[in-house]
Amino acid sequence: MEKKDKMHLTSYKHMSRLVEKYIKDRPAGKVLDVGAQVVDGQKLSYRDFFEDLGWEYVGFDVVEGKNVDVVSADPTDIPLSDDSFDLIISGQAFEHIKFFWLTFEEMARVLKPEGLCFLIAPSRGPEHKYPLDCWRFYPDGYQALGEWAKLELLEVSTDWELDSEIDGAEWGDTVGVFEKPYQVHSPKDKENHLSSLREKGLIPVAAEQTMSRAVLSFLAADDPTYSAWSGHCLFAHWITHALSPSVLVELGTHWGTSYFSFCAAVKDGNLSCECHAVDHWGGDSHAGLYGEHVFDHVQSANAEFNEFSSLHRMSFDSALDQFEDGSIDLLHIDGCHKYDSVRKDFYTWLTKMSSKGIVLFHDISETQEGFGVKRFWEELCTEYKHFSFTHSSGLGVLAAGNIVEELQPLFEHSDQSDEAQVVRDYFLGVSGELCQPSVPAMAQLYLDTGHGFTSREVFTTPIISGVAEYQFDSLSVGQLRFDPCDCPCVVTLKEVAVRGVDGICQPVIPVSSNACFVEGNTYYFSTFDPQIIFDIRYTVSGVKVLCDVQIVSTRGVQILIGVLAGQAKRKKAESEQAKAESEQAKAESEQAKAESEQAKAESEQAKAELEQAKAELEQAKAESEQAKAELEQAKAELEQAKAESEQAKAESEQAKAEADLGMYAIWQQACAKICKMKSYPWRKHARLIKKSGLFDREYYLQNNSDVRSSKQDPLHHFVKNGWYEGRRPNANFDSESLLSG
């Protein structure tokens, strides 16, 4: 790839033409030049084209040198990130690369979706080894390269004529322009992004379930409303349901593609919403001037929605007074696209927006002369929460008020985030932009009568109202092949029947196809030669095919496949999850069964223990009754003992009384003796009385206060004085009686 030859003038002129045609009006981006080295004496460089336009230029080569920013000794391994460049160019390099198709595949990898690739290489010329000279290129080679790297070849040409007046004409440049299809992808979650979108509420489930139908049935071939807005019809349906507006206003309706998308959403969701379309229906500098047939078409279409839809044929300013301030929930601005006009429309109608108002701007991606929506949108993005779609001329979604909960996921990430790109990918993937207006398909039927499918046994007929019917002389057929058209398409087979020699029709089932994706009876073809094959193996005289055929761009099929493949993966994952949950439930059931058996055994054991406890309880009860009887007997014996004790006590009291009486008598006798023996020493008297135990010291003190206050020994006082004073020695002894006696 190291180039020692100087850039020839034809290559420079070809690159200049491509830049003028494809790049000049595009927003500035990043460009990678593969084989960028500028050698000594070389004056021309592709860098000049792009830096003048404000593009970021990166030069790649296998050796370091002038104009080279990135180096890799292996040209089949470019050390740059996936989807990182808006444009990739290469001139006079591929003839020097051994395995150029691998290098081209790397270029496709680092190219962004919808990015372009300009490739210029010689178709002839003398050998020039720098260090190798391996190849020359023709248009068919570029076609093969595109198919290899999955890039779409937009144009290709070769300088077949030799122009000796132009430097480099002897090389016969082959010039090609490739585009990378816009694939549904998510850098962070490539396989499961649809599930994450559904969780966030950003995918309408009903639309997802019928997404292929939504895409393929937007517009019929003779529908005049097919326009750039068709790519946003599904989003219009979704945001109408999510916002649930009470008042919806569109400024600039034209054929009504956008307006009737809103109306259809209102009707489909049975929403309580007033819809208003404002337009003078005369055209302008961008849409062109048109006659009454446009308004007639809109009036006719509006008949389906006239219960809630009103057409206002007037200027935007005239319609302003018909709406109260703060009353409009959803406003779509798609009138004159000049900067001053769209700016005026927004600020004039801003006061009419409600607290949850959303404003939509179409054509935010348009860069044509006179279009100012893009510029004004970029200004608004610095002030308001927003979301941007870039396909179908671009659609801006502006939050002019508080964001309702249902729309929060749409605005929670920046426009540059991976999450925002996932949302854009999804709505692009199911948008009407993918479908070209339908045309009646010319379907071919090939019969294999023993020689394979050849042009000798082929019949052609148009598919009219979904029917292709073939009649021929009776033929013994092994297989038949149905070719619905000669371009990428989506085919839904409703019924295929063959007529036998007896005139009876029998249905047949397809056995194979070259479709790149099959979902039920729907076939997605990206090839220009779609085929569906049936086994017959008997004599037939006619074939009838009932089907829907929608002509779709290759890019459209690829995106649809990406979306549907995502669905298939999700369904498979859900199936695997359901299987795992079933296995887990089975295991839990087995465990529950085992636990139940264990519980049953424990229950039987508990039952036995209960019976044993019951028996023990009966025994305890009997023992309790016996103990009770014994207690009653003991109680009776206790009562008897108590009675006997009382009796004994009484007898004891009586005995004591008798004893006291006896002692009293003795005491009386003793005292009488003492009284008669006055000369008997008092101390001996005291010892005698104390020994008798009949002197109550406490009693004597308590009843003789003078003795108590005198601190005299009470016994000594009694012996000396108390006895003849008639004082009692205890409660039962009467000294006075003794003295008087």
Image (cartoon, rainbow, N blue to C red):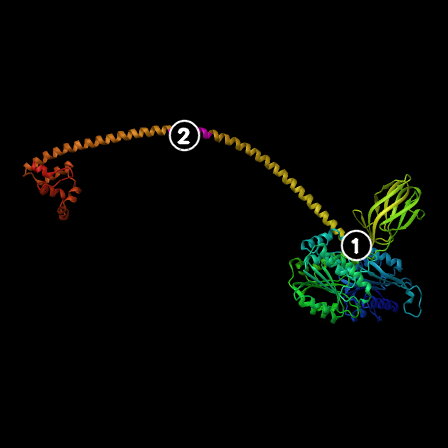
Magenta segment includes 703: no
Residue 103 is left or right of residue 580, and the answer is right
- Please tell me which of labels 1 and 2 falls first in the chain: 1
Magenta range: 616-628
Q: Which amino acid does label 1 sit on?
A: Ser
Instruction: State whether residue 73 is above or below residue 714.
Output: below
Instruction: State whether residue 165 is above or below residue 490.
Output: below
Give the crowd class for mark 1: few <14, some 14-19, many >=20 residues within 10 Å: few
Which label was assigned to residue 624? 2
Residue 496 is left or right of residue 568, and the answer is right
Circle 1 — which element?
loop
Q: Which amino acid does label 2 sit on?
A: Ser
- Does residue 715 appear anywhere in the picture? yes
Please name which of the two marks, 1 or 2, marks the residue nearer to the observer: 1
Q: Quadrant of the N terminus?
A: bottom right
The residue under label 1 is 217
